[in-house]
Image (cartoon, helix red, strand yellow):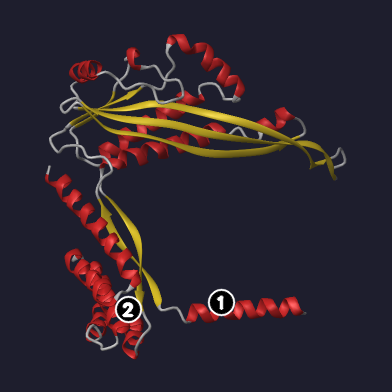
Amino acid sequence: MKTLNQLFAFASIGLLLASCSATNQLTMSAVEPAPVHIASDVQHIGIINRSLPAEGNHGIDTIDKILTAEGKNLDKHGAEASLASVKSELERLQRFNKVAILEDIPEVRKGLGVLPAALTWDQVDKICEEHDVDVLFSLAYYDTNTKASAQATEMELPNPVGIKAKVPAVSLTLRTQIQNGWRIYDPATKEILDEYSFNNNLVNSGQGINPMKAVKAIMNRKEAVVETSSHIGDYYARRITPQSRRVTRDYFVKGTDKFEIAMRRAQAGKWDSAAELWSEEVSNPDGKIAGRACYNMAIINEINGDLDKALDWAQRSYSDYDTKEALRYVNILKYRMAQKRELKRQLAR
């Protein structure tokens, strides 16, 4: 009974603390510059696949396939799905006049399941000139690494008279890691515009009365790898475009009656109306109240897209009234302003 009473006490304290919180949280949209910038005069894009093993690497590749229980051509199909998705997404952007997957370039196919050395600029120049492209997207490596684990279990099967009975079975789980890396080459500036590696994980499982039956139960692994690889291609192609994401901010809702009325207005979506009440409190003789009001004025200006005014209010909240939360907010706003400048620079080029 004592333990139960303690649990109720802790729960009550938690609810009380939540209800007494001085801040509420809001979310807003923020546009960030593209992680990778491609100049506006680039019109022709070539895409190459370096993930296929070179002639001298067949032994390593074969051993790897045995150790990781990879299906035949699984890497090939996954890599092709990624390349096709990059091409499709770049075309969907309607920014380039030409997007082509460049085939039959054996001298660049030297993947080993790790990020290989970059192409030389002589190689890049030659490929771009021969195929009339301005920038080269390269799938530098692609590899699926699958580990299997089996466990004895039971499963129900109908016996000869149709009654289900439990029989010994094997539960098989395949954990597949998709490893891939990309580079983007700009021969005009002799810059590698991007070098990016990431991993994705898939889990497939199935049951059977023996290991082979269990394997048949998870035959959709290839389809899952291809689908995930396609998503990888979509994601990578979008790295050249500005991205909109949701960001969270805290704003003050406690201090005076006006703060609580403003909170209800904000919750109803009337942010400018809430700001009218906050602005009335920025000269409050109580420094704590005035600091919170200045902080909230920074919030409303960020919501309305005026980052300069937002920064002024946040700095005033911290420097004049020592509002602790304002210092972190000042740094957030400076970061957003730097991103806004970079976005403007990208759009101008």
Number of numbered discs: 2
Which residue of the protein is positioned furthest toward the top in this rendering?
56
Question: Does residue 160 lie above or below 145 as drawn?
Answer: below
Looking at the image, residue 38 sits to the left or right of residue 155; the answer is left
- Residue at the location (26% across, 89% down)? 285
Q: Quadrant of the C terminus?
A: top left
Residue at label 1?
A: 14
Badge 2 local density, few (<14 within 10 Å), some, or many (20+)?
Answer: some
Asked where in the image residue 111 lies, by quadrant, the reply is top left
| Between 204 and 143, the one nearer to me in the picture | 143
Residue found 21% across the figure and 66% down from its top: 311
Location of residue 294 in the rendering, given as x and y in whole percent from the top left corner:
25, 77
Would you call the spot at circle 1 few (<14 residues within 10 Å), some (14-19), or many (20 or more)?
few
Q: Which residue is mark 2?
A: 266
| Residue type (three-letter) at the residue carrying disc 2 | Ala
Q: Position of residue 265 (x, y in %)?
A: 32, 82
Q: Earlier in the sequence, mark 2 or mark 1?
A: 1
Residue 290 point in image, percent of width and height: 27, 82
Question: Which residue is at a point 46% across and 36% down the rendered structure image?
Answer: 199
Is residue 134 visible in the rendered image? The answer is yes
